[in-house]
Image: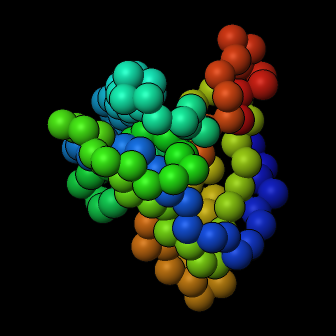
């Protein structure tokens, strides 16, 4: 797949997340489960409806924060806490199709290497759910 890479400035985005660690091959089940748990917590606590699901990868050992965008800070729960996606200059691509995202991450790393940039954090923002794999963003 060919990606249309863009470099943009973004503002930090508040998130409601669960922090965890998982092997790379387990992320496809662990991340959706964490996002679902965050949505359940936010609804039960009476917080405003979250936005898009997110996953922020914090290091090479696949320590992650997974959850959803939120519009305001909130009091944490037993597992869910308020965090944020970083702001600043980012290289971004849009992946459409199944959740095999390694090529999208590799495209960004390749661009960073070729352009003298470093990739310090990686994250994903997921489009709203659909049963049509061709429309997954």
Image location of residue 128, percent across then percent down: 67, 28
Toward the viewer: 34 or 23? 34
Image location of residue 26, percent across then percent down: 31, 30
The image shows residue 89, relative to residue 131, as above or below, that is: below
Find residue 84 and report its image quarter.
bottom left
Q: Is residue 90 left or right of residue 94?
A: left
Residue 99 visible to an observer of this rendering: yes
Name the residue at 24% across, 38% down. 77
The image shows residue 75, relative to residue 85, as above or below, that is: above
Name the residue at 68% across, 35% down. 127
Q: Is residue 19 left or right of residue 65?
A: left
Q: Residue furthest bottom?
A: 116
Name the residue at 63% across, 70% down. 11
Image location of residue 72, percent across then percent down: 51, 53
Q: Is residue 135 left or right of residue 126?
A: right
Find residue 135 and report its image quarter.
top right
Q: Is residue 137 left or right of residue 53?
A: right
Toward the viewer: 82 or 47? 47
Name the residue at 27% across, 51% down. 63
Q: Residue furthest front?
A: 46
Find residue 107 and report its image quarter.
bottom right
Image location of residue 116, percent across then percent down: 59, 88
The image shows residue 129, relative to residue 19, as above or below, that is: above
Toward the viewer: 76 or 68? 76
């Amino acid at each position: 797949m060919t990606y249309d890479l863009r470099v943009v400035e973004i503002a930090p985005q508040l998130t409601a997340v669960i922090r965890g660690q998982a092997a790379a091959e387990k992320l496809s089940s662990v991340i959706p489960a964490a996002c679902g748990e965050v949505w359940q917590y936010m609804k039960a606590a009476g917080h405003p409806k979250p936005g898009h699901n997110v996953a922020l990868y914090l290091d090479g050992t696949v320590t992650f924060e997974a959850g959803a965008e939120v519009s305001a800070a909130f009091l944490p729960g037993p597992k869910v806490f308020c965090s944020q996606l970083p702001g600043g200059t980012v290289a971004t691509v849009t992946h459409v199709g199944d959740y095999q995202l390694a090529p999208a991450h590799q495209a960004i790393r390749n661009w960073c290497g070729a352009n003298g940039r470093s990739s310090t954090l990686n994250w994903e923002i997921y489009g709203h759910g659909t049963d049509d794999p061709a429309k997954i963003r």
